[in-house]
Amino acid sequence: MSEQIDQALERKYDAGFVSEIESETFAPGLNEDVIRRLSEIKGEPEWMTEWRLQAYRKWLKMDEPEWAHVDYPKVDYQSISYYSAPKSMKDKPKSLDEVDPELLRTYEKLGIPLHEQEMLAGVAVDAVFDSVSVVTTFREKLEEAGVIFCPISEALHKYPELVKKYLGTVVPKGDNFFAALNSAVFTDGSFVYIPKGVRCPMELSTYFRINEQNTGQFERTLIIAEEGSYVSYLEGCTAPQRDENQLHAAVVELVALDDAEIKYSTVQNWYPGDEDGKGGIYNFVTKRGLCEKNAKISWTQVETGSAVTWKYPSCILKGDNSVGEFYSVALTRGKQQADTGTKMIHLGKNTKSTIISKGISAGRSNNAYRGLVRMGPGAEGARNFTECDSLLIGDQCGAHTFPYIESSNPTAIVEHEATTSKVSDDQLFLCQQRGLDPEKAVSMIVNGFCKEVFRELPMEFAVEAGKLLEISLEGSVG
Amino acid sequence: MLSIKDLHARVEETTILKGLDLDIKPGEVHAIMGPNGAGKSTLGYVLSGREGYEVESGSVSLEDKDLLDMEVEERAQAGLFLAFQYPVEIPGVSNMEFMKESVNAMREARGEDALSSAEFLKKAKEACKQVELPLDFLKRGVNEGFSGGEKKRNEIMQMIMLEPKLAILDESDSGLDVDALQVVAKGVNSQRDGKRSFIVVTHYQRLLDYIEPDYVHILSNGKIVKSGGPELAKEVEKSGYAWLKEGEVA
């Protein structure tokens, strides 16, 4: 492919700065004492400590999965620090005024002002910095509606019964290697509870930031939507530019009870490493939602960051007539590798799922879609539609599709469509002949390719996602 | 407006243009005719700077600026427009978005402010009307699922919106029925204002019944072998290009 595209693709990573913040960080290493200490710092109830230890013991017996189409050196789990928190957070600031201004500046630089009056109207934010939640905005307003939106560490104190009832019910603590590790050492994350019949009055969003060196980020998010409720939730992620790889192993559990709807959107922009694949985040994430009767869970993800991505947001369509959706844009460039997709497990009658996956590969990257559609014996009249499109930019990248279809019910219908296309010289030439520089041209072509997915994002974020793609494709031309 | 001197250009290892000279003054319409393989489309691509079309020697200036020294988009911004013979699809990008980016990129290059959405829409509606395309056309993906005739009309619509100084129409008549041909010609004629120049590349005389050229040139084997007025096109229509070969032999 033309040299111009390569130049257009030279990426800047705007979120790559490091904040000078004094942190309390555990020495690297993992054993039962580390977990106990972590649990103690967080003042957790006894059962939680025990839960973590059980997860840890399971993890010790598990092997790191090797089936994904990714290649990275083995992670040394003893060289990672499992807890890091800004020192200023130790005294638990009660309001924004008490929060370390350097922390607030970090988020401001990232375009996430945490002062409520400056924020996007209608979006509440939980800001997680390394291992702790810094601040959650708009809490009073949400409380009026009966919505709980707080760090999960706080939920463990304030609503232990709720957490205990649902934690690990969708992603069990021994579910997989990374989920078990997360269950043992998760430090913070968001907790959301929407009461029966309530339509959450605003978008909820969590912004994850890894700052400290040699630390892993293990956040845990739990969202419970009671009967007939609705919530739209968005997460964003960035990390400084560092030469070492850093591990991010999160778990997200969604519970949508009868007639409830959860819309979960992700804009993931972890540091992807440099052109030669040095540094970057290992993003090994387990996300799964459970749908009861008539419930709906919709995953939308825009993934541009991380050195290695291993991520399959899934839906268990347990209740009759429940609906699962997965809309994904995954962009890889440089030496990034992504193995991402979804699992739709149809158990109930007349359950429906839609999968739209758009993979864009550039540079020397590899982008794989891996998806499972399973129709259980009880999935009478269930339907799935899958569309899987790959766009190649240049001739040194790879796109791969691994669809798995299992059907145990003859009345279930599964459809799968897949296409692979290239940003062609013809398209590029047409755009340039109409006065657009190659950079703008590539970003416009890619945006067009992703349109079906962007449409699913909440409006403010659709714009942001478009811009993020543009930045990811940005570089100096000429 | 445009001055081409002794232009030699090749595609890969094959030299296609072999010493082409052409002078176009503001407001003039020049038709370029010739047999298949004469280098007609190559000329359009070389002038617009397409990758893979390499200039070996010669010079080209547009309004006294060295065209060959500019990037593709800079040539476009300088006022060179190429209506494609086979316009390519850009799925998911609407005609509207595409043209808005395009119009504003041109304006920016001229140091003008971007058009507001309302101003742009007005202009776009006008242009659609000129080439008899329905308005919902603007919402469709660029050339996505367009018929051959729609693609050609879409090219002319873009030309109308971009108001170039020099427009090259690369076989804008190919594959069109008479009605569509007239629409395309009408669109082009509406843009003839005494200042804007055109190069009309065509294989057949038919288009020139509707777009009357000031000059007709016959391109053969990479060179202009004969120039004349509109009557030259009629001659070609009558006797074809066979005489060229005889000429070469002689």
Image (cartoon, rainbow, N blue to C red):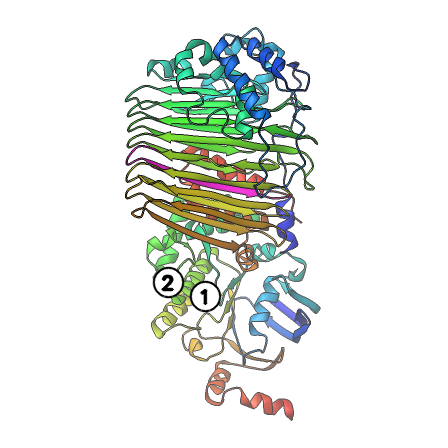
**Quadrant location, the N terminus of chain B:** bottom right
* Mark 2: amino acid: Val
Badge 1: residue crowd in 10 Å (few <14, some 14–19, many ≥20)? some
Quarter-of-image position of residue A294: top left
The earlier-in-sequence mark between 2 and 1 is 2
Can residue A365 be seen from the camera position used here? yes
Q: Residue at x 31, y 40 (%)?
A: A379
Q: Which residues are magenta?
A: A318-334
Residue drawn at (59%, 62%) of the image: B48
Q: Where residue A238 sits in the image (x, y, percent)?
A: 57, 29
Residue displayed at 59% across by 70% down: B43
Q: Position of residue B20 (x, y in %)?
A: 64, 75
For numbered disc 2, what is the local secondary structure? Answer: loop
Nearer the observer, A359 or B56: A359
Extreme residue toward the top, this view: A91
Labels 2, 1: front one: 2
- Left or right? Give the position of B246 relative to B192: right
Q: Please give the residue where the numbered disc 2 appears in the rendered image.
A: B131
Q: Nearer the viewer, residue A131 or A344?
A: A344
Query: For mark 1, what is the residue?
Result: B192
